[in-house]
Amino acid sequence: MNWRALIRHETFLALLLVLVLVVLSFQSDRFFTVANLLNQGRLMTEIGLIAIAMTFVIATGGIDLSVGSILGLVAILLGVFWQNVGMPLPMAMAAAIAAGTFAGFLNGFIITRFRVPPLIATLATLALYRGLAEGISQARSVRGYPDWFYVLGQGEVLGVPTQLWILFAAAVIASVILAYTRWGRTVYAIGSNEVASRFSGLPVETTKLALYTASGFAASLAAVIFVSRVSTTRSDMGTGIELDAITAVVLGGTSIFGGRGTIIGTIIGLCLIQALKNGLSLAGVKGDGTIMLIGAVLILAILVSNIFERSGSR
Amino acid sequence: MTAAVDLPPIRPRNGARRQGFLRRLFADYGQECVVLGAIVLLFVVVTFINPRFVNTNNLITIFSGNAYIAVAAIGMAMVIMTGNIDVSVGALIGVLATIAGTLAVSGYPIWFALTAPILVGMAVNTVIGVLVAYGRIPSIVVTLGALSILRGGLIGVTGGTWITDLPPDFLIAQKRLFSIPVPLIFMIVLTVAAFLWMRYSAFGRSIYAIGGNPEAAVATGIPVERRLVSVFAIHGAFAGLAAILFATQLQVIQSTVPPNLELTIITATVIGGVSILGGTGTVIGSTLATILFATIGSALIFINVSAYWLRAVIGLLILATVLADMLRRRGRA
Amino acid sequence: MSQPKPFVSLTGMSKSFVGVKVLKDVSFDVRQGEVHALLGENGAGKSTLIKMLAGLYKPDSGAIVVDGDEVKFAATSDATAAGIATVYQELLLFPELTVAENVFLGHYPRTRLGLIDWPTVRERTRDLLDQLDTHDLDVDAKVLSLSVAQRQRVEIAKALSRNARILIMDEPTASLVESDVQRLMQVVRQLRARGVGIVYVSHRMSEIFALADRVTVLRDGAHVATCDIGEVNEQKLVSMMVGRPIDSLFPKAEAEIGDTVLEVKNLNHGRHVQDISFSLRRGEILGIAGLVGSGRTELALTLFGMTPATSGEILLEGDAVRIASPRQARDLGIAYVPEDRGLQGLVKSMAIRKNVSMATIERLSSGIFIRGRAEADRALAAVRRFGIRCRNIGQPVGELSGGNQQKVVIAKWLETEPRVLILDEPTRGVDVGAKAEIHTIMGELVKRGVAIIMISSELPEVLGMSDRILVMSGGRVTAEIDRADATPERVGAAMTAHRNAEAA
C-alpha cells in the first residue's frame, strides 16, 4: 500500500505540473522559452539544494528550521573572511561553508545528545544563527567580488546556468542515496519507527547527526551561490527560505511525520512552485497572487492525497 | 469563550498530605519561575550598571511595545498545548492589522474597525482548525499553506503601501486608562483571564487533556475534533486582538509585520514552559517570556551592547533555556 | 447461596478481526456484589470480551442485556451510562491534570451558573479516595507525580464517581508490588460489599482463589466453563485454560548441550538488574520466569546493550565484552526479539523484505549500495523457511497476523546468525498454530547449536520449553531450577520469594 500511495501522489503532482506548464505557456509566449526556463532554474537552485537535504531530515521525522539563518550566517562570513580578514576568496568560501556545516552539526548534536525535539532545537538556532549574522555584519554589506566568483551564480556552463548543474548533480546523488543505499534505508526506517530501528541495531543517532550536518552544508552551499547570484552580502539573506523549502518537500509527498518521501517528489514540488511563480507573473498576476496560490496548492495537494490514502488503506 | 472563571479550589481537609507551598509552586510552575527569575536578575544587574534602566518611561516602552506579541502568544500557547502548531499567525496579524486600518480610514465607525479583525481572525483560523481536525492534515502543513496565502493576500491588498491618516480615536494603543497604557492593560487582563479560564473551566481543562493524552481524551468522551476547531478559533481571536494593538501603536500601519513574527511568538510560548509535545504549560509563562525578550532587548541597549547583537544574545538565551529544561526533565525522569 | 439475577449478561458474543475469529459464541454474566474472575491464556479472547462490555468493540453477533433491557453500545459513553466502568492495564489518565480533575473530567459537577463547582469536585474526590482507604493521596497532586498503584486508585475512583455498578479490572495487579496487591484486594472486597459487580481479569491463581466468587475460563476464543470457585481447584483451572496435557503442547526438541557461550557475572543496571549471574551453553534453552516488573526484560535489554550494564562482567565464549549498544550486541552475535513487537520489533509500514534485512543491511550491501537481489533472496528464503503467510515479500508487515509478524522479527534476527538468541514473550498475542511453529523453530535452532534465553509470562511455556529455568523477582535471581525439578509450585514460589522475604 505504501509505495503505491507514493506513486500516486507523485504521479498526481507530475500531472499537475504538466497541466500548469501547458496552461501557463498559453498564457504567455515568453513562458515556455528555453531562456526563461533556464533562468527559472537559476532562481530555484538555492531553495532546491536546501529542500533536497530537508527531504532527508523530514523523512526521519525531523525538521530543520535554521537553514535560512545558516544561509545568512554563511553569506556574512564569506564577505567578512574575504574582505575584513583578508583571506583569499576560495579559502574564504571554504571557511564559510565549513562554519555553516558546523552550524548544522551543532543542530544535530543538540538534537541527538540532549534529545531536544528538532522543531525546538532548530527554532532556537534559527534565532541564534541569524543573530550572529546580524552581529557580525553590523548591517554592512559586502560587494565588489572578483569577476570569476560570479560564474557560480550568474555564469553558464555549456549553455546552462552553472548552479543548475550543481542542483542537478545534488538531486541525482541524493535520489540514489535515498533509494538504493543502506543510508537511505536507515532514513526511512528511523522515520517510520525510530524505536524499532534502534532495536534492530541501525545507527540512529549517527544518521541523524549526519543529516543535520548535511542540511547545514546544503544551506552553506546555497549561501555561496546566493551571494554570487546577487553580487552582494547581507545579513537578512535567506529569511523565510526554510518555509519555502519545507513547502516544496511536503508538496512533493514527503510525510511530515517521516518514513515516506522521495527526492523526485521534492524536485517536482519545487518546479511546480517555481513555474507558478514565474508563469503567473508573466501572465500579469502580481507576485502576491502567486504566493497565495502556492499555499492553496500545498493544502489541497495534501488533502487530496490524504483522502486517496485513506480510501486506499481501508 | 464565555467568561467561565470559577471559584478557586478550596484548601483540602486535614489528613491529606500537602507539599510546601513553594515546592508545589515550583513543581507546577517551574518554567514560569525560571523566566521570572531571569527577568528579575536582568533588572538587578542592568540597573546596577546603568540606573537609568528602571526609569518608568523606559519600562512602559518595553512592555507596551511588545504587548501584542504576548497577546498573540496566549492563543499560540493554547494551540501548542493541544499538540499542534501555527506558523501562519504572523502573516495573519499583518492581514488583520491592515483590515483594521483600512476600515478606519475608509470612514467606518471605530468600533467596527476594532471588531472586524477579531471576527476575521476567528473565521480564518476556524478554517485552519477544520482542516486540521477533520481533514487530518498536520497543523504545520496547513499553517504553512495558510502562511503563503495570508502573506500573498497581505501584499495583494495593500500593494505594499502604508496606511496613514489614521483617525486619532482609532489609535487606542497610544491611549492610557488610569494613566496605564492600554496595551499593558490588554496584556495583563487577557493573560490573567486566559490563565484562569484554562485553569478552572471545563473547556480549559480539556485543552490540557487533549494535549496530554489524546486517546484517553476520546475515551473520556471529550469531543476532540470540535475542541480543536474551537481552540484554533480562539487563537484567531487573540491574533485579532494582537493585530489591533499592533495596528494602533503608531501613526501609520506598515504593510509588513516584523519578519519571523510567528517564530518569535512560538519561541515565547515554548520558553514560557509550554511543551511542544502538548499538554503542559500556562499562558503566564508565555507572557513572562515575551517580557523577558523585551527586557533583554532594552537591557542590551542600556549596557551599550550593539543592537546588532541583540538577536544573537536572545538566540543564545533561548538555546540555554531549552537545554536547561531538557536537563531538568531528564533529572526528574 | 441463592442465585441473584445477573445485572449484565452477554449471550452468544462473536467477533472477528480481518477474517480471524477471536471470539466464538461466548456467554458471560455478572451479578451485583460478586467478583467474577475471567481466566484464559493470552489470546484466549478475554480482552476482546471486556472491550465489548466496555463499548470499545462492537460484537459481530450476540446480545448485551443490562438490568433486564437489551442494549447496544455504540461508544464507551453508552457503557458508562449503563453503569459499566473499566480500569485498563494501560491507565487512561491525564498526567498534567490533578487527581480531582482526572476523576471528574467529562462530568464535572456544576454550580447553578453552569460553572465547574471546584469545591465539590475536590470534596467528592476526597470522599471517593477515602472510601478506597486512600487517605494519603492529595487530590491536588498532578497525576504524573503518582506511583502506578496510586494512579490505579485514581482510575477506580473515576469509575466510582460515575456510579459504576459493574467494574471491569484488566490484570490490575500486573505491575503492582506485593504490598500494593494486598491493598488492592482489600479495595475489591470493599467494593463487592457495597454491591458493585467486579469482572476480575488475572493470571494469578492466588488472587483468584482469594477474591473470586465465580470463575469463567476462555480458551481460543471459546467459552470453556463458568463455575463457582468452590467447585474447582488450581489444577482443574489450568487444565481448562490449556485444554490439553502440557507435554504435548510444548514439543521439547532434544538438543546436544555444548560448551558455555555466555557467562554473566554480577551484572547491574538500575533497580531492575541487581547482581545477576548465570551461564548459558550451546544448544540450551534457558527460561526466565518472573512477574511483570521483576527485571526479566530489563536484564535482556542490558545484555542487548540498550541499557548498558553499570557494573559486572559479560563473558562471551570466555572473552570479556562490553556491550554499549544494540549494534555492538549484534556484532557480537547476540540477538533480541523484543517484547513489544509493534513498537520495538517491526517497522510495520515497511515491506517484509526490508524488515527481514534490517539487522543485516551492511552485509547485504556492496559499499553503501543495497544488493536488491540478494536482499529479496534472503527474504524469500525466510518466508519459506518459517512458513510466513503473505502475498509477497513486498507486503507491509503491518498487514500480517500477529504470529506471522513475530516470525518476521525472528527471521530478521536469525539473519544475523546469532550465538545467543534472546526471545522476550515470543508467543504473546500469537494464535495456537503459529505458537507451535515458533516452538518448533526454537527446537531447530538449539539443534544447530544456538543458545536461547526465553522470557515468558506463561508458566506452562517456560516449564515445557526450558532446559533450565531462572526465576527473577525484584531485579534479582531468586532461583535456578533444572528441567527435571521444575514444577509450577516451585517456580511460582520463587517468583514471589524475594517479596515475601521482604514483607516478612
Image (cartoon, rainbow, N blue to C red):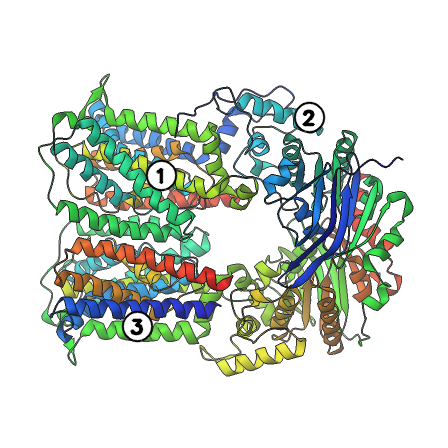
Q: Residue furthest front?
A: C69
Q: Disc 3 on helix, strand or loop?
A: helix
Q: Could you tell whether A232 is left or right of C485 in the image?
A: left
Considering depth in this image, is C432 or A120 the residue closer to the camera?
Answer: C432
Q: The residue under label 2 is which amino acid type?
A: Asp
Q: CA distance from mark 3 to mark 1?
A: 42 Å
Q: Could you tell whether A55 is left or right of C295 in the image?
A: left
Q: Quadrant of the C terminus of chain C?
A: top right
Q: Could you tell whether C249 is left or right of A191 in the image?
A: right
Considering depth in this image, is C311 or C429 the residue closer to the camera?
Answer: C429
Label 1 Cα neighbours within 10 Å, binned few <14 / some 14-19 / many ≥20: many
Label 3 Cα neighbours within 10 Å, binned few <14 / some 14-19 / many ≥20: some
Q: Which mark is residue A271?
A: none
Specify whether residue B29 is in view.
Answer: no
Q: How many marks?
A: 3
x then y, percent, for residue B168: 12, 26
Residue C29, compared with residue A247, is above or below; it is above
- Report the residue marked by disc 3: A170
Q: Residue at x 18, y 58 (%)?
A: A80
* Figure quadrant of residue C224: bottom right
x then y, percent, for residue C200: 75, 43
Q: Quadrant of the N terminus of chain C?
A: top right
- Report the residue marked by disc 2: C130
Q: The residue under label 3 is which amino acid type?
A: Ala
Q: Looking at the image, is mark 3 or mark 1 nearer the viewer?
A: 1
Q: Which mark is residue B233?
A: 1
Q: Looking at the image, is mark 2 or mark 3 nearer the viewer?
A: 2
Specify whether residue C134 is in view.
Answer: yes
Q: The residue under label 1 is which amino acid type?
A: Ala
